[in-house]
Amino acid sequence: MHAVILAGGKGTRLRPLTLDLPKPVVPLLNRPLLEYQLAMLAAAGFGRATLSTSYQPDRIREVMGDRSAGLDLGYAVEPEPLGTGGAVRFAASPADGTVVVFNGDILSDLDLSAVLEFHRRKGAGVTIVLSEVEDPTNYGLVVTGADGRVRQFLEKPGWDETDGLRTINAGTYVIEPEYLSLIKEGVHLSIEREFFPLLVERGDPFYAYVHRGYWIDIGTVGKYLKAHADLLRLRPLTLPGHREVLPGIHAAEDAVVAAGVEARGPVVVGRGARVGEGVVFSRFCVLGPGCTIGDGAHLDACVLWDGVRVGEGARLQGVVAGQESRLGSHTRISGLFALGTGGHLPDYSHHAEMGEILEGE
Ligand code: GTP
């Protein structure tokens, strides 16, 4: 059995954060996103995975190395992007046997062993994992029969087309080698828009496993923040090398948090970070290694990557700041805001929703 993680996308919706850090390795509680998927593979007994890369492959290799979450890592680097289907074919050959594929931007508590058991029990050639969402209109809706066979794919359907269905493609697949060989080598192909509809048309044994647990795709800045909020809310916070230095504040051993810093929700403070006096955290916040937060700053639902500096008296809400960026003293930001690597907001910068300010102009 061969595990492939699709990690070659450009992550355009997460720009500017993904301009120099590919989406599959953006930090989630200060660990690369791919580590969470590798942990899922490790839990199902996998000892090795291939990372299927194309956009900034060296950056991914630099972050992930040769081993992570107890798995040996291999890299398949496409000379040019082959799309989600072409990439699977490029990374795994039919000779590898059954292939398990993950999208590299998913966070979920899927039990992969249960999916594999379902796949075998059904005698499936291909199995797709589905997840139920409130609003399926932004996703690929998958229609199944009572026997669990996939009947139809509707890409970004209108509400009138959904017919009450909310089961969408959750970005995890199991593929038997004879179906993998339907994908031509070296040809750009979308697994969801071309390969799966072809299987339906051919009447192949193509089944859907519905995952009823947690699932989110981290495609946008809003979802990136939500994934942090969910992780901090849903799981007991046990981070190796961290301890709760003040109520709600989980700091790495060499981080410095001033006495009296207040947290009104869970806060993670990375290695070597420094939090000044009178700082207040609301909801949740994650500070990457080497961040510094000036005295009297207020941070609400913020994720700061490595080496970010926040000046004194800043008020930040919903900010994701890329590596080594700087938000000057007394900066005020509310609403979702993403600052790219090395970005710099001078002191007293401010941003707020425009609201109805121009009403009647
Ligand atoms: P957006 O540009 O914001 O849509 O993000 P994306 O580039 O990640 O695209 P999308 O979310 O549709 O991709 C789903 C998964 O497939 C992600 O894990 C991508 O990294 C991966 N992916 C997309 N296109 C390719 C490709 O051409 N090659 C490889 N190896 N992976 C890909």
Image (cartoon, grey):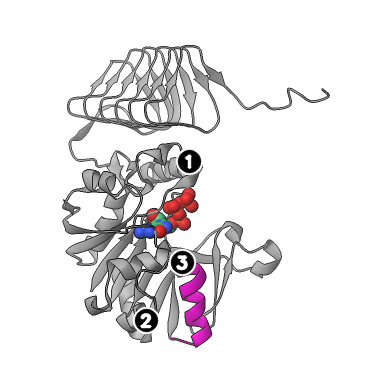
x, y (%) of residue 220? 49, 45
- Magenta stretch in the rendered image: 192-204
x, y (%) of residue 236? 30, 45
Q: Amino acid at mark 1?
A: Val
Marks 3 and 1: which is nearer the front?
Answer: 3
State whether residue 88 is above or below residue 334.
below
- Secondary structure character of the magenta stretch overall: helix
x, y (%) of residue 170? 45, 63
Q: Amino acid at mark 2?
A: Tyr
Read off the residue under disc 1: 221
Badge 1 crowding class, 10 Å Cα cut-off, few under 14, some 14 to 19, many 20 or more, is many
Q: Is mark 2 within 8 Å of ligand 1?
A: no
Please state, as top left, top right, bottom left or bottom right, where the N terminus lies in the image.
bottom left
Marks 1 and 2: which is nearer the front?
Answer: 2
Q: Earlier in the sequence, mark 1 or mark 2?
A: 2
Q: Earlier in the sequence, mark 3 or mark 1?
A: 3
Q: Amino acid at mark 3?
A: Ser
**Element marked by disc 1:** helix
Q: Is mark 3 within 8 Å of ligand 1?
A: no
Compute the Cα span from label 1 to label 2. 35 Å
Please state, as top left, top right, bottom left or bottom right, where the C terminus lies in the image.
top right
Left or right: 239 in relation to 180: left
Read off the residue under disc 2: 179
Read off the residue under disc 3: 190
* Count of marks overlaid on the render: 3
x, y (%) of residue 240? 19, 40
The stretch drawn in magenta includes residue 80:
no
